[in-house]
Image (tube, rainbow, N blue to C red):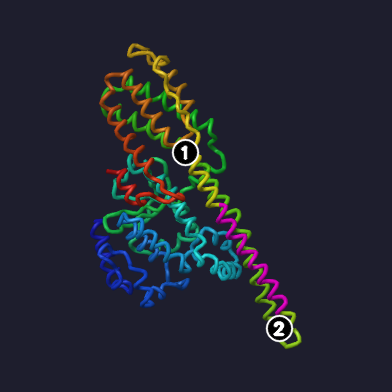
Amino acid sequence: GAIEAAEATAAKALDGLLGRYRRADMTVDWKRASRDAAAHTFSGAGKFTLAIFLQEFGYALATRDPLRLEEFFDQVASTDFYVEYGLFVAGATAGQAGYSLAYRKYLRPFLKQGLMHQVLKSQLSLAAGLALPQLVHGTFDGKTFVISLGSLGISSTLVHASMSRIPWVRKITAAKSGLLRATGWVYQAAELAIVLTASSEIERFVHGTLDRRAAKRALAEAADLVARRLKGASSATEREQALRDYALAWEHYRVHLYTPLFAAQEQLQVRLEPALEGVMLDGQAADEALERTTDSARLNEYLAEFARRRREGANGTSRIEQAVATFNREFEEGLQEVYEDNRRDTPFIPVAVLGGPDTPVGAFAAAFASAHRKVSDNRLETYEDQREALAALGRWLAAARAEVDAADAVVTGLARDDANFLGENGGLRKGIAEQVRAAGE
């Protein structure tokens, strides 16, 4: 089974080159390994492989310790991993092998400077936020962590072939977990199953296929439907399913509120690609100038060219740093917009509008749905709105109160976790895996 597979993988990890540096929780003490030069074995482009990344990422997550995860990404940032598999390499691998190799050559110094580290932390924060409701309502339990490759800064285009060569990574054709319905892969680390998805949720929301008005309209339609389904249900099972579908509509709306964060991610890629390409072209030109230097008479010409290219390279570095700084600022502003701004601070559903238990289903459903068009644009306040809506359903339909109370308990826990979710600078207050685990219990 899965646990046996995890134990077999762990045994191999302990027997490997880094085995002597593993702690009791199976994570690597990277500082000690580096002092002994063992970690440098994995610092080359062909050494820190996708398999190593997945294995060590899994063990770091399984500890539910944010410091372990931080340590892991510090190590990744010091290697060539993102030169091989990063999102920003994908555009340079569309068929021109020579161009791809050159791109990676000149990209490498910037990624190894750790410029992407804060970006990765922000992306992981967003991915973990997406994972919370999936674990509560999806097909995975609290020992599963779901994350998209894009959120890890990894190009799904570049990893497909490598994934197929890792025996302990299993391909899944559909991860139906509430929000995400996508192909992906799953593997085990300790007792934690890691599900990697190659979904396009970011593109869907960024490109405006669901605007705010449409999102609220979809929630209103779900509200109308849940009232009618609850009234017509003949069993507790039917009522529970109706309420689960209604909760899913709320989750979809909350994901839509993440649009500013998705947009910041996309804009980072838009800004970085030309900057990195410029650095690559500058470096290529300097190399070509050196190759043309066949005698001392042309040496001064080369030196002048080299100096000019170094200045332009410095400008390229500045553009890259500026792009990352802009992303960090936009992501932080997006978090404030999603979690702090746009509170309505007025009752979501005035009780008088809905009537009492004798209100016919058609009239109640219409008024109930109409109220949902005024749902808050503040992610945390939406939990208050959802609880108000559930309370209204319970007052109207006594037969559904037990199921409504159970649904309310789930929302209460989810609201608590979401409110405690983010710390300073978009970081995770309690650690990604710990928070996700709490949501599933």
Which residue is tagged 1? 340
Residue at the (23%, 60%) spot, across then down: 4
Residue at the (61%, 62%) spot, across then down: 318
Residue 134 appears at what percent x and percent y? 37, 42
Outermost residue, top direction?
358
Q: Which residues are magenta?
A: 303-326
Instruction: Please give left or right for residue 399 compared with residue 178 in the image.
Output: left
Task: Check disc 1 and report its element: helix, strand or loop.
Answer: loop
Task: Check disc 2 and report its element: helix, strand or loop.
Answer: loop
Which residue is tagged 2? 293
Residue 156 appears at what percent x and percent y? 47, 56
Q: Is residue 139 above or below residue 222?
A: below
What amino acid is labelled 1 in the image? Answer: Glu
First reached walking from the N terminus: tag 1 or tag 2: 2
Instruction: Please give left or right for residue 190 compared with residue 127 in the image.
Output: left
Q: Is residue 233 above or below residue 274?
A: above
What amino acid is labelled 2 in the image? Answer: Thr
